[in-house]
Image (tube, rainbow, N blue to C red):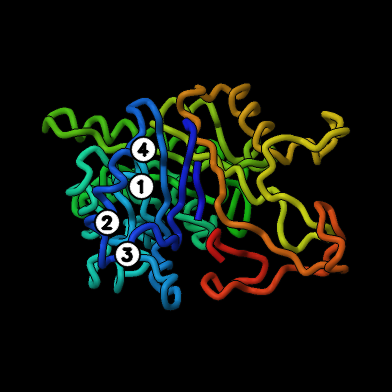
Amino acid sequence: MFLWPVLFLSALGGAGLASPADEESEHRSRRELQPSRDLKIVCYYSNWAVYRPSLSKFTPQNINPYLCTHIIYAFAGFNKRYELKPYDPYNDIEQGNYKKFVGLKQYNPGLKTMVAVGGWNEGSKRFSHMVSDRSQRQKFVRSAMKFCREHGFDGLDMDWEYPAFREGGKPEDKQGYAQLIKELREAFEAEALPRGKERLLLSVAMPAGKEYIDNGFDVRTIAKAADFLNLLTYDYHTAYESNTQHHAPLGAADGLRDYDDESRLNVRWTVDYYLNAGAPRNKLVVGVPTYGRSYTLEDPEDNELEAPAQGPGEPGNATREKGYLAYYE
């Protein structure tokens, strides 16, 4: 689960914000939490949370529709013909989770519900091939518009992790991806204007690290085309490091010099880097994780930051992943 301004982004990956039994009363009690119109609280809902055990199972019906301004359903994929498809057809379509998700707007008409395409599991191979050719990009663009309209989503969140990296990635991905984002925005505008429809929104997930940014993302072009950028400002450190670390530090540790690599592993550095690269301040949505990375300590009595660690901590009962704990575990 994550919270992030333009100022917060939150991912609802399994939190018990409301139970189905009393969701109506919960919705009423939370209405005062609605943010001002200028604030973006962008939340990700991870669709695999429906498979968590017992009370940690989390469905679209558990989401408080007044908590966020935008909620993004993660993830959809796309096939070899560059057509968008549900990642989990059984739950997304057959069990009606897409409909339940966009149906949250019945409670909060001002809510925007979007769908994310990609994610870590999608990788780079298919993305890289798609963006390399205009005709292939256009197939994706047309499919994206059709997919969003058919399922009632208000927009698309592009989440390629990461252009020019991982299996199948190429240096040319940087230019191709920027062109895709530009073409998506142009198509969204062209599709909406003649019909008097509200334009589909477009957001892009952006990495925190310098190498990923420099080699894969034309920041100025993407920022101009997108409505907002979701900064992945977390997991600067992993649970597999030899010392305990904060995986989303706000600033650099005391004593670090600007040219030290470690000085770049914090939220402040990432935000400043995007601003200097030409991203408008009002389009940056900063990621704040509400999950933690856990460790198995060398010495249980030595439990401060940077304490020696043997490896990741034991899995939690809900998330069932070594080195990862939801906020409620």
Q: Where does the image place residue 63, in percent across and percent down from the top left?
A: 33, 56
First in sequence: mark 3 vs mark 2: 3
| Amino acid beneath label 4 | Leu
Circle 1: element type: strand
**Residue pushed farthest left?**
195
Label ID, residue 71:
1
Split into 4 quadrants, where in the image is the C terminus? Answer: bottom right
* Residue at mark 3 to residue at mark 2: CA–CA distance: 15 Å
| Pointer 2 local density, CA inside 10 Å: few below 14, some 14–19, many at least 20 | many
First in sequence: mark 3 vs mark 4: 3
Residue 186 visible, this angle:
yes
Write the residue at 31% across / 31% down.
Answer: 186
* Residue at mark 4 to residue at mark 1: CA–CA distance: 13 Å
Would you name the residue on which mark 2 appears? Answer: 101
- Nearer the camera: disc 3 or disc 4: 3
Circle 2: element type: helix
Q: Is residue 307 above or below residue 109?
A: below
| Amino acid beneath label 1 | Ile
Label ID, residue 19:
3
